[in-house]
Amino acid sequence: MEILEIGDKVRNKKLLTYNALAMTVKDIDENKILCEYFDSSSRTDKEIYFDADDLDIIQKVDGIEEP
């Protein structure tokens, strides 16, 4: 598994609610990753913690997209 960095874009592999959302990694605390996403229903940015194993990287902070 590739190492997550602050600023990476990720998706959740398990929860359908968060699977379609591209979220930004905001903080890393051991295996807990704080992700920020835009909630269109409330029109606000929200944050939620996930386990690192539950996330797929879709774009690295340096701009290189994952295959």
Image (tube, grey):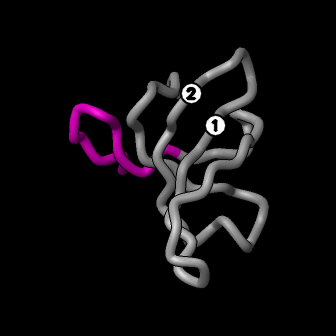
Q: CA distance from mark 1 to mark 2?
A: 5 Å
- 45 or 67, nearer to the observer: 45
Question: x, y percentage for residue 2?
Answer: 51, 27
Which secondary structure, mark 2? strand
Tell me the amino acid under the disc marked 2: Asp
Q: Is residue 46 left or right of residue 29?
A: left
Q: Residue furthest top?
A: 30
Residue labelled with disc 1: 34
Contact, CB < 8 Å: mark 1 with mark 2?
yes
Residue at image point 51% right, 49% down:
10
Q: Which residues are magenta?
A: 57-67
What's the amino acid at mark 1?
A: Leu
Left or right, 41 with respect to 58, comes to right
Q: Based on the displayed image, in which of its 4 quarters is residue 34 positioned?
A: top right
Q: Residue at x 67, y 65 (%)?
A: 18
Of the numbered discs 1 and 2, the one sitting upstream in the chain is 2
In the image, is 24 to the left or to the right of 12? left
Residue 48 is left or right of residue 26, and the answer is right
